Amino acid sequence: MDKTTGRTDWKRVDHLTDAEIARAVADDPDAAPLGAKGLRMVRRGRPKSELTKQPISIRLSPDVLAYFRSLGKGWQGKIDSILREHMMHHR
């Protein structure tokens, strides 16, 4: 881009090699990776945790499940914390 006009200098771009273009994209902090169809890939959701948890299936009594769900957001994490604390005290 011509910094004085803010427009792309297409004559210069037409003469760039693939390596020069790749280097320019890698150096651009605003460049998002493109997917297989050329669409910008945007990472959504929460950031990846260092400690990943494994999804499982567990059978709980209805009253136990109702209690933890009544605690609101993060109820599964609360179950994990309680189980971890129990595990530490019973080694």
Image (spheres, rainbow, N blue to C red):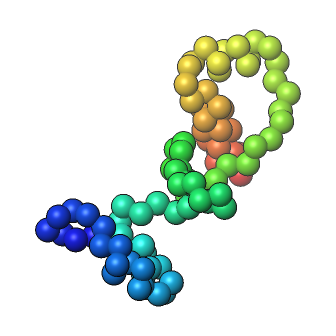
Q: In x, y percent, where is residue 17?
A: 47, 87
Q: Nearer the viewer, residue 40 or 45?
A: 40
Residue at 83 percent of width and 33 percent of height: 58
Q: Quadrant of the N terminus?
A: bottom left
Extreme left residue here? 4
Q: Nearer the viewer, residue 31 or 89?
A: 31
Q: Residue 38 lies in what quarter of the image?
A: bottom right
Q: Is residue 49 visible?
A: no
Q: In x, y percent, where is residue 28?
A: 36, 70
Q: Residue 86 lies in what quarter of the image?
A: top right
Q: In x, y percent, where is residue 66?
A: 70, 13
Q: Is residue 29 visible?
A: yes
73 over 34 or under it: above or below = above
Residue at 33 percent of width and 81 percent of height: 12
47 over 50 or under it: above or below = above
Residue at 65 percent of width and 57 percent of height: 37
Q: In x, y percent, where is residue 3?
A: 18, 69
Extreme front residue here? 11
